Amino acid sequence: MSKNPTALKVGMSGQLRGRRYTVRGWVVYSVEIDGEKYYWTEFNVADANGLGATLVFEETEDGPTWKWFTLLEPRRPLTIAEAEAKKVGDTVEYEGRQIPITLVDESYAEEIEGEPPGNVAWHETARYFNADAGQQRLFVATWVNGKIEFYIGQTIGRRLVESAFGLPRMAGYNENYSAPVGSSIDWEQVKAAVWIIGLISFFLIRGCYENYDPDPNVVFAAAPAMKPAPAQVVPAGARGAIAGQSFAVTAHAKVAVLQPRARFEVREYRLRGDDGREALLVHGWEGGANHWLLLESMEMPAKFDAWLAARVRSSTNLAIGDQHYTVTNLLLARAGPIDGDATGAPWSARDQYGFLARRGDEWLLCRWDETRIFWFKGRLVAPAALKDLGVR
């Protein structure tokens, strides 16, 4: 039985905005983590002139997703020995600048039909790394059997692919490939695992490299514009009551929040209560100038570390004690300059991953990096409740 989870088959042709592509073959790749296998599928497509590309299908936290990537010829290609020496956090040259490597791993060819991308062989294992090329693009290097290749890519619209090839609309998750939407996670039973979504995050091309024939017939989704943070209205050192609780503002940072469909900046004020408890006052979520969140620090079981947090997907149900939350957003947070005492604050010099969950009018925020994880819980507060801090 074929492991290809899609209706896209060898020999099918599709019209992508004026250029016709035919599927020449496909390969199902897998990776095994703690005894559990994860899969994704790559399709070799080519037009009438032989110009090829690769469509990648994966199950993500937002449902079935298609990616498009093409072969790249860097100005200075790495040798296999140089590529094998790379690790997460190292850099690689692209477009005359150094970009960070975000993932190093290997893929295993589970099943093949026709002419697969890269001429990979059945049951062959290839090494690769991903690097963040900016503008929602990914630089990929992959090597096997003494040959190394480089790719660049970005996400392509699912409806565009389905319409082009006449595929049926897909909804939710394929139960053989990832957790179904709305599934509940029991933290006592879940084993720690690497967040593998980045494993197959090949993105659709922007055409900023040498010897690439940019395809003008494919529509690329532009990154949403960054909504700037509201003006700072609470100075570090301010003190006052919020909803009957007394707090002092000990630090402030402007934080960029990147989500799949939104990019915005917020101002975060670190608070300390008279009893020593920590809280976070967040101003401007999703660009709302009158949007204030008061989130108090909370503790989670020690076994719930960054590896488990990274496994959470959108629409997952979180059971925390007898309370159930629904994950509404996955995010990446980047803190700017910090004003005040940042010791132990929920900010980092590096990117932080995170998610937001809701239970009625209660908000749950989790953020983490390689060394720390932070949890906050709270609610929206009206600007009038912050008048002691100078908010009008």
Image (cartoon, rainbow, N blue to C red):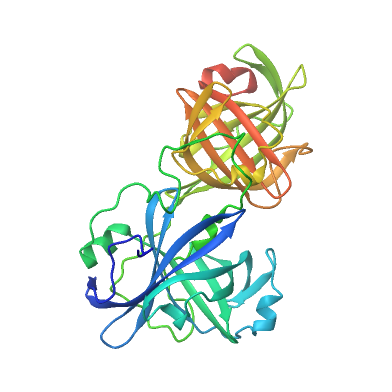
Residue visible at 56% across and 46% down in the picture: 311
Q: Nearer the viewer, residue 20 or 23?
A: 23
Q: Is residue 135 visible to us here?
A: no
Q: Position of residue 341 (x, y in %)?
A: 78, 36
In the rendered view, does 336 fall on the left or right side of 328? right
Q: Position of residue 377 (x, y in %)?
A: 59, 27
Viewer-nearest residue: 239 or 306: 306
Return the residue found at the far top.
Answer: 244
Q: Residue at x 69, y 68 (%)?
A: 87
Q: Position of residue 333 (x, y in %)?
A: 59, 47
Question: Residue 83: x, y in percent?
Answer: 65, 78
Q: Residue furthest front?
A: 1
- Seen in the picture, residue 377 relative to 310 is either above or below; the reply is above
Which quarter of the image is occupied by the C terminus?
A: top right
Is 337 placed above or below 196 here?
above
Above or below: residue 202 compared with residue 38: below
Q: Quadrant of residue 246?
A: top right
239 or 19, nearer to the observer: 19
Residue 151 shows up from this direction: yes
User: Which quarter of the rendered picture does the N terminus lie within?
Assistant: bottom left
